[in-house]
Amino acid sequence: MSLHREFEFAIETVRSAVQICRSVQSQIDVGRWSKGDKTPVTVADLAVQAVVSRRLSEQYADVPLMAEEGADELTNPEYADLQQQVTQHVRTVCPDADSPATVAEWVGRGQTGVDMNRRYWVLDPVDGTKGFLRKEQYAIALALVERGQVLLGVLACPNLPASLTAPAGETWGQLYAAVRGQGAEQLNLGPGNVITGRQPLRVSGASQPAGADWVERVEANNSNQDITAQIGQHLGLSAEPHRLDSQAKYAVVARGEAALYLRLSLSKSYTEKVWDHAAGMVVTEEAGGRVTDVWGRPLDLTCGRQFDRNRGIVASNGQIHEAVLAAIRAMVPAE
């Protein structure tokens, strides 16, 4: 089964959406926005989802979209200013966005429901809300899924430097893309979000956890960083983790800079969302890595919008995966 057309379409669609995020983010005054004030990221979320939905409906009208955002704010008169901002940004990519009502229709397509037994797209328009507001790491993530398997995925990481240890400076970021069974690649972005080069991705060759670099999320919800730190000590991970927002963590594992991404919440009621992982998962796996939940179970995409049969995430270079799972079993009470 060839997915070349869908793959190149997804790359181009995500690349065009970067333009919107850069425009919105350039207007953010870092430090001005509180954690509860998500107005800028809401503009970007809705505008990106509208653009991606519009393009998908043009080329793949019979393939539904599962996306994070709803259109309520675009139909409520109380949010007229927000509606105008979103519509203006959408017009920079889709000139036929003639009104907020049209944009709301495009956004709402992502909430119409999908058939788990058929093919559908999955979108997180801006993954990493707080990273976006801090002008740090965020991602635009688009994946194509069929019968529980991710067929392809594209991640845009506009603020990700070529190396996490490189001195701070201007970066244009990268796209990370993969087709199931065909490997993964990194596409470098230049001025104007033009693709300046493509290169294959390969995970780290580290065969032992001790001394390996690793990544985890920035936010310490439910003391999750306490338990991941204990697991790290058990494994002999001497280096402090690189803490990043969004699916940029998957990108760092896929390009071989880190051997492990560990995500574990102590709250048993918390369930991971499909759009937060689908694209990053296939990119990591096609780069030679492995992605499971913390008990070693494959991520089950047949449950709908959440991974109801999974808990947490372990994404690794594959070679250290079993050692990580063993450490988790030793440190975390069994379900």
Image (cartoon, helix red, strand yellow):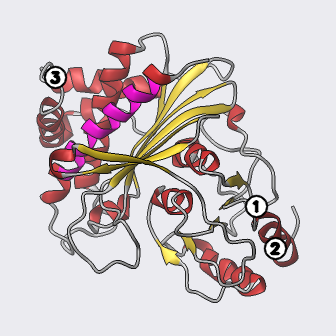
Q: Is residue 266 visible?
A: yes
Mark 2 sits on what residue?
332
Of labels 1 and 2, the one closer to you: 1
Identity of the residue drawn at 12% across and 58% down: 27
Identity of the residue drawn at 64% across and 89% down: 238
Q: Is residue 126 visible?
A: no
Residue 322: say if magenta: no
Q: Nearer the viewer, residue 316 or 224?
A: 316
Identify residue type, mark 3: Ala
Mark 1 packing: few (<14 Cα in 10 Å), some, or many (20+)? many
Q: Where is residue 199 shown, x and y percent of the image?
A: 43, 49
Element at label 1: loop
Q: Which mark is residue 294?
A: 1
Identify residue type, mark 2: Val
Q: Is the residue under label 2 in contact with that under label 1 (CB below 8 Å)?
A: yes
Q: Nearer the viewer, residue 79 or 58?
A: 58
First along the sequence among labels 2 and 3? 3
Outermost top residue: 62
Q: Where is residue 301 shown, x and y percent of the image?
A: 68, 36
- Quadrant of res 70: top left
Residue 10: say if magenta: yes
